[in-house]
Image: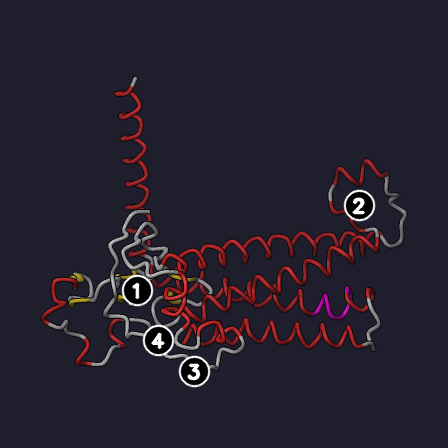
């Protein structure tokens, strides 16, 4: 029985390995096409969803829930604009920040003699790269402390731009759940919750002659879109927080060799200003190192 399980497990691993090799080969052969299609579509989808939810909440949902001329509406309006601005400003800086090994100063492209054994050779770039730097098949370059390749930013998330990516996800999650609260209350007060699910329509017997049925269907569809956006944003944010908390990366999730404790781990990403960087993407917060030298710990288990 044990031999059968091992055989099945070995076959599954072989299949997964073949799929991985096929996917990587496809990425190598169609690198330009993938970037020309996937990146613009991802960015357009992100901008469209955020912009649509902002306009919908501020022009339709919130005015029906509170006085458009009142203080509460104005506070929510300015706060929502700040959240959207924080999302796109961090996304923009993340896009323009070069986190590749080639962006290092000339004198840092060679390892110090005492750290030469920690560097490794990249056959694709044909250079020596520091620890935690790995090659991206889409960017076609090695990235410092490479976490993953992001289709929204059209580049790799790594040592220099992970701060902006983390804050981008923070405000994306915050904004999506804020919008979800608005929409849940709005759908409930307008009675559109009934048409949010086909089974509820049948059970409650909503008449097809209801003149507001069309608008109820639209609001219920917006609510579903909002739920999907909130789940996607929070899922990515939680994953990213976990990686920073453990000082690991999505590229090497089980690596705990650089775990210095939660506060030090977050400072290595957010910089010297720490959590003050959540207030603005323009706060100058120098990173504690240039991405070539990393303090290791003895704690390396998962």
Camera-side residue of 90 and 36 = 90
Q: Nearer the viewer, mark 3 or mark 2?
A: 3
Question: 121 above or below 95?
Answer: above
Q: Residue furthest top?
A: 1
Image quadrant occupied by the N terminus: top left
User: Which label was assigned to residue 194?
Assistant: 2
Q: Position of residue 68 (x, y in %)?
A: 82, 74
Residue 12 is covered by the magenta coloring: no
- Tell me the CA gap for discs 4 and 3: 10 Å
Q: At 38% across and 61% down in the image, what residue appears?
A: 149
Q: Are marks 2 and 4 in contact (CB under 8 Å)?
A: no
- Tell me the CA gap for discs 1 and 4: 13 Å
Camera-side residue of 12 and 236 = 236
Helix, strand or loop at label 4? It is loop
Q: At 36% across and 60% down in the image, what residue appears?
A: 261
| Left or right: 128 as drawn, with respect to 62 | left
User: Where does label 3 land, which residue?
Assistant: 284
Q: Position of residue 127 (x, y in %)?
A: 16, 68
What is the quadrant of residue 154 in the picture? bottom left
- Tell me the CA gap for discs 3 and 1: 21 Å
- Tell me the CA gap for discs 2 and 1: 49 Å
Q: Nearer the viewer, mark 2 or mark 4?
A: 4
User: Where does label 1 land, which residue?
Assistant: 145
- Highlighted magenta segment, given as a residue range: 55-61
Q: Residues within 10 Å of mark 2 (few under 14, many from 20)?
A: many
User: Where does label 4 land, which residue?
Assistant: 287
């Amino acid at each position: 029985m044990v031999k059968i399980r091992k055989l099945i497990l070995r076959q599954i691993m072989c299949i997964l390995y073949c799929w991985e090799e096929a996917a990587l080969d496809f990425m190598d052969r169609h690198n330009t096409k993938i970037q020309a299609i996937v990146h613009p579509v991802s960015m357009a989808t992100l901008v469209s969803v955020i912009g649509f939810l902002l306009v919908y909440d501020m022009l339709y949902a919130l005015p029906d829930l509170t006085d458009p001329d009142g203080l509460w509406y104005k506070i929510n309006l300015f706060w929502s604009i700040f959240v959207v601005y924080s999302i796109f400003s961090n996304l923009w800086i993340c896009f323009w920040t070069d986190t590749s090994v080639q962006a290092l100063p000339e004198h840092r492209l060679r390892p110090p003699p005492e750290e030469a054994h920690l560097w490794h050779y990249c056959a694709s770039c044909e250079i020596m790269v520091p620890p935690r730097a790995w090659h991206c098949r889409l960017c076609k370059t090695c990235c410092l402390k490479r976490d993953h390749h992001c289709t929204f930013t059209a580049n790799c998330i790594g040592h220099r731009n992970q701060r902006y990516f983390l804050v981008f996800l923070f405000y994306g999650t915050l904004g999506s759940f804020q919008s979800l609260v608005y929409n849940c209350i709005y759908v409930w007060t307008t009675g559109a919750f009934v048409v949010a699910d086909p089974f509820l329509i049948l059970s409650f017997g909503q008449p097809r002659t209801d003149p507001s049925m069309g608008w109820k269907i639209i609001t219920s569809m917006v609510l579903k879109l909002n739920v999907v956006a909130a789940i996607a944003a929070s899922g990515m944010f939680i994953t990213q927080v976990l990686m920073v908390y453990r000082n690991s990366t999505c590229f090497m999730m089980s690596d705990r060799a650089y775990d210095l404790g939660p506060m030090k781990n977050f400072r290595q990403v957010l910089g010297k200003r720490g959590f003050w960087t959540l207030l603005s993407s323009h706060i100058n917060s120098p990173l504690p190192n240039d991405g070539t030298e990393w303090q290791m710990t003895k704690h390396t288990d998962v």
